[in-house]
Image (cartoon, rainbow, N blue to C red):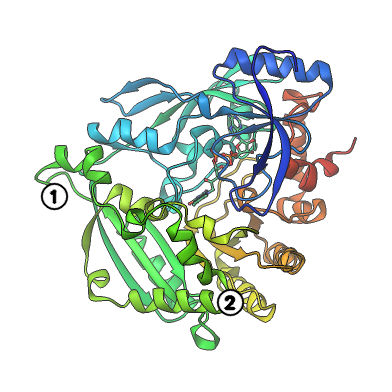
Amino acid sequence: MSVALDVRDEELAGWGLAQSARCQVAYPESSAAIADLFAEAGRAGQTIALRGAGCSSGDAALNAGALVLDCSRMNRILAWDAKSGQITVEPGVTIAQFWRHTLPDGWWPSVVPGTSEVTVGGAAAMQIHGKNNWHAGAFGDSVLAFDLLLPSGETLTCSREHNSDLFSGAFGGMGLLGAFTALTLQARRVHSGNVWEITTAHHSLDTLIAALEEATTWATDLVAWVDTSGRGKRLGRGLLKASRDLAPDEDAHPELTRTVDYQLGRKSLAARLPKGWLPRLARPLTSPAGVWLSNRGQWMSGQGIRQRRSHLSTYVGANFPLDAIPGWRDSYRPRGLMQHQSMVPTQAASATFRQILDRSRQAGLTPSFAVLKKHRASHEPLGCLVDGYSLALDYPIRRGQEPQVRALLGTLNDMVADAGGRIYFAKDSTLTPAQTRRLYGDEALEDFRVLKEQCDPKRLLSTDLYQRAIAPLFGA
Ligand SMILES: Cc1cc2nc3c(=O)[nH]c(=O)nc-3n(C[C@H](O)[C@H](O)[C@H](O)COP(=O)(O)OP(=O)(O)OC[C@H]3O[C@@H](n4cnc5c(N)ncnc54)[C@H](O)[C@@H]3O)c2cc1C
């Protein structure tokens, strides 16, 4: 490429490490640089994928043999209003940067995923959800406006009032319509840097789901960890972690608890280990026996008295527990892991999730980690959220087993389609075009195709995920 920007030949991987691709990677620092790259790639007949922090587990931010624009250097906070809680950021700003900037003033991002490493651009493009999805909606619900740079070089400002079709379609649009170059978001008011948290143990999937439903009447955030070692009547048993925000008068020192130092104060034991130790120590836990043992251990530890009492936890501790274990995914090296997250309507959820757990066990591929959440539907064309629940699963890839894992996940995709559910693209590695059609339906796909045609008629924007699971449905 002849643009002034450096373009490097790099091997990029999805977060799960099981998928990677050789790409030409550029690190633009401004919208003008992205526009130049769009123009240059258009002339050269190349495709471009956008990338944030690379936290999508499969191939959503890969583009084998072609260009990837890593937006992580576009990470400036452009405006902050501590009175209204409105913030304007470049797309590469991470959720960690966001909360560090706003929490001292009493505001927390309205929707956060399980790690603070993701970028705002990547979160919007995947229409991510948090543990408050059932009442707060998805990431896009907290966005007031954004600028989208189209492959033509034109920038459209979109909001609920202006360019509203594009405003809705770009959430979950997976970076296939244009590049977010600035986003204005509404944060949510918080009166402390702490939340009340309580963990309760439930002996079957049905009692776990019932407890989760009951907690929706008072909790702010809900997430259930599912014990994948449970069988028979115990299949799907798990621990429900519920938390709620403090009321205005519950924290005597909010100016202290909302500081960055307080939030990051206590380092976990794992974070204090010398670099590289944790993956080495944890690697045995990814073997079949290790998966059984770690799940059983987690279940037992959930019976502890401290968990069962309501206690205070920081926002960071409650929302990003995995960030406190640096480098934990390295324990899955060298082959990595594949993830699978299905969203299933309420009435079919319990039976489908039981089937999924059973089928995995029968295949000898018990997931190492399983998480259940409650959701509400969102209506953008390729949005996966339904009124119901999701089950997110991690499958370690062991020597020679990738084909079996892929076959299993393919079967699970069909089960979810049979149940009227959806698969979350951010965690997907195996959807085929036929499965995408069954899961999303012709109408939604046609709506997205029309938007794609309007925004990107020359099909400049692409990813390996798009080529694998969607593009073949749109024809030549
Ligand atoms: C430990 C962990 C926990 C997670 N927990 C959750 C969770 O609780 N809920 C949830 O919903 N997800 C969760 N995820 C998934 C994650 O939130 C999504 O994959 C998210 O999209 C990753 O953001 P990213 O910045 O890494 O983007 P990437 O993964 O790099 O890219 C994601 C998509 O965004 C597009 N994109 C990136 N930048 C731009 C831009 N500037 N303009 C337009 N498109 C762009 C890319 O093309 C790609 O399609 C989790 C991931 C991890 C690793």
Q: Which residue is under mark 1?
A: 250
Indicate which quadrant contains ligand 1.
top right
* Badge 1 amino acid: Glu
Question: Which is nearer the eye, 200 or 384?
Answer: 200
Name the mark on residue 288: 2
Looking at marks 1 and 2 on the same chain, the residue that comes earlier in the sequence is marked by 1
Q: CA distance from mark 1 to mark 2?
A: 45 Å
Circle 2: residue type: Pro
Marks 1, 2: nearer the viewer: 2
Q: How many marks?
A: 2
Label 1: how many residues lie within 10 Å, few (<14), some (14-19) or many (20+)?
few
Where on the picture, by quarter, is residue 77? top left
The residue at 28%/52% (across/down) is: 267
Element type at mark 1: loop
The C terminus lies in quadrant: top right
- Where is residue 117? Give x, y as percent: 46, 41
